[in-house]
Image (cartoon, rainbow, N blue to C red):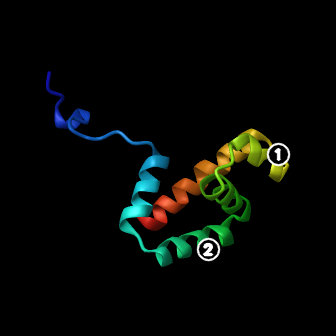
Amino acid sequence: MRVPARSGGGAQNVTLTAGLAETILTEHSVSDIERALAALEELDPRAYRVVEMRYFAGLTEEDIAGVLEVSLPTVKRDWRKARAFLYGQLC
């Protein structure tokens, strides 16, 4: 059965995280990424730290919550906010 284009036929499903990582690695220079991260750090230092620990250090959300001494829902909110911000800066 063929799925109509208006229903997403032929589109590849990716998560925001996977899509962001793919975009970062294939379409942007290191200086673009540095500028986006610097803008995030200026806007929201804690969200920036979440990105550092999650994306670059590979820590889990639970580990990050412990390091930052905040709740797990706060880390999840910061991670979503940071991904959306970086996606907006880089796309």
Three-letter amino acid code of the residue under disc 2:
Ala
Q: Residues within 10 Å of mark 2 (few under 14, many from 20)?
A: some
- From the viewer's perspective, is 11 left or right of 52? left
Three-letter amino acid code of the residue under disc 1:
Gly
- From the viewer's perspective, is 23 left or right of 69? left
Residue at the bottom extreme, as displayed: 31
- Residue 10's disc is none
Whole-percent x, y for residue 7 in the image = 24, 32
- Residue visible at 44% across and 62% down? 24
Instruction: State yes or no: discs 2 and 1 in contact (Cβ < 8 Å).
Output: no
Viewport quadrant of the C terminus: bottom left
Q: Answer with mark 2 or mark 1, whichever residue precedes in sequence.
A: 2
Whole-percent x, y for residue 16 in the image = 46, 47
Tell me the element at label 2: helix
What is the distance, in whole Å, between disc 2 and disc 1 at their CAs?
Answer: 24 Å
Q: Residues within 10 Å of mark 1 (few under 14, many from 20)?
A: few
- Residue visible at 69% across and 43% down? 61
Residue at the front extreme, as displayed: 57
The residue that label 2 is drawn on is 38
Work out whether residue 50 or residue 40 is closer to the camera in this orientation and state it.
50
- Residue visible at 21% across and 36% down? 6
Tell me the element at label 1: helix
Whole-percent x, y for residue 70 in the image = 82, 47
Please identify, in this view, whether the residue under mark 2 or under mark 1 is nearer the observer: 1
Residue at the top extreme, as displayed: 1
Rendered position, 31 above or below 59? below
- From the viewer's perspective, is 73 left or right of 89? right
The residue that label 1 is drawn on is 66
